[in-house]
Amino acid sequence: MVLGFRAIGFDLLTALVDSWSVYVAVTGDDARGRAWRLASLRIVTAAGDYRSYEDVLRDAAREVGLPAAKADELIGRWGEIKPWPEVPAALGRLESRRLAILTNCSQRLADIAAKGTGGRFELVLSAERAGAYKTDPRAYQALVDALGLPAEQILFVAGSAHDVKGAPAVGMPVYWQNRARLPVPAGAPAPLVDAPDLSGLPEFLAQTRADSSR
């Protein structure tokens, strides 16, 4: 297969940044912070139509026994979210390419977290702007439509397992930043790359560009 990608779409809150740590910082407890983050993920990936992400955070907090005020604290501290260590350098090596984000949160929080990566994105597409949360195919299709390219020419960089299944459903191949070393979800095609971080992404893209020019 000859591969050539004209744009790269990124998951934000798992692939590019460590959103988990701010949940832990707000709760002061690793187990409760991770449980809260997992609850918010479960709610949004099952939601379909967009509803207030900030309300989702409050609902998830209550579900794991936290006061809703903790969600307000989390929202206020959203700017503390940091990129994974290798991400700024990897994005810096991709500045000549079309880069975009598709993320499951509100537009305001998406913009804050995206800015923290140091990357230059032509598009930051939140679930709010797309009108639907991943894994609804409408969210992925909104990215394809906004970039104006055939889906197979957009590499989607997944952070969560749900994107490994969701992005190919509209035709986007996947590079999986699989820090947790999870198995490929049942029914999902194997990603092009299953890597522990994003340090190898620039080389992978350089190779696919070289292959497509032969």
Image: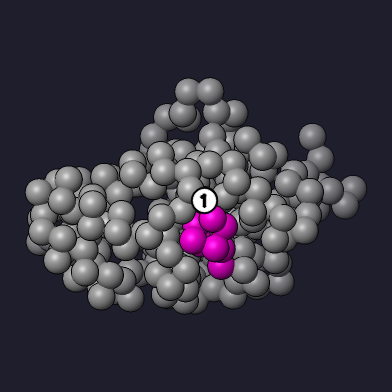
Q: Quadrant of the N terminus?
A: top right
Of the residues shown, which amino acid type is indicated by label 1? Ala
Q: Position of residue 36 (x, y in %)?
A: 21, 50
Q: Name the residue located 15 percent from the left edge and 60 percent from the top edge.
A: 68
The magenta stretch spans which residues? Answer: 124-132
Category of crowding for the residue at label 1, using alpha-carbon neighbours closer than 10 angstroms: few (below 14), some (14–19), many (at least 20): many
* Rendered position, 200 above or below 111: above
* Rendered position, 29 above or below 138: below
Quick check: is 58 in the magenta stretch?
no
Residue 143, image quadrant: bottom right
- Tell me how the rendering is colored: one colour
Looking at the picture, tell me which residue is in the foreground, 92 or 31.
31
Looking at the picture, tell me which residue is in the foreground, 45 or 48.
48
* Residue under pointer 1: 132
> Hey, which residue is sitting farthest top in the picture?
187
Q: Name the residue located 47 percent from the left edge and 43 percent from the top edge.
A: 48
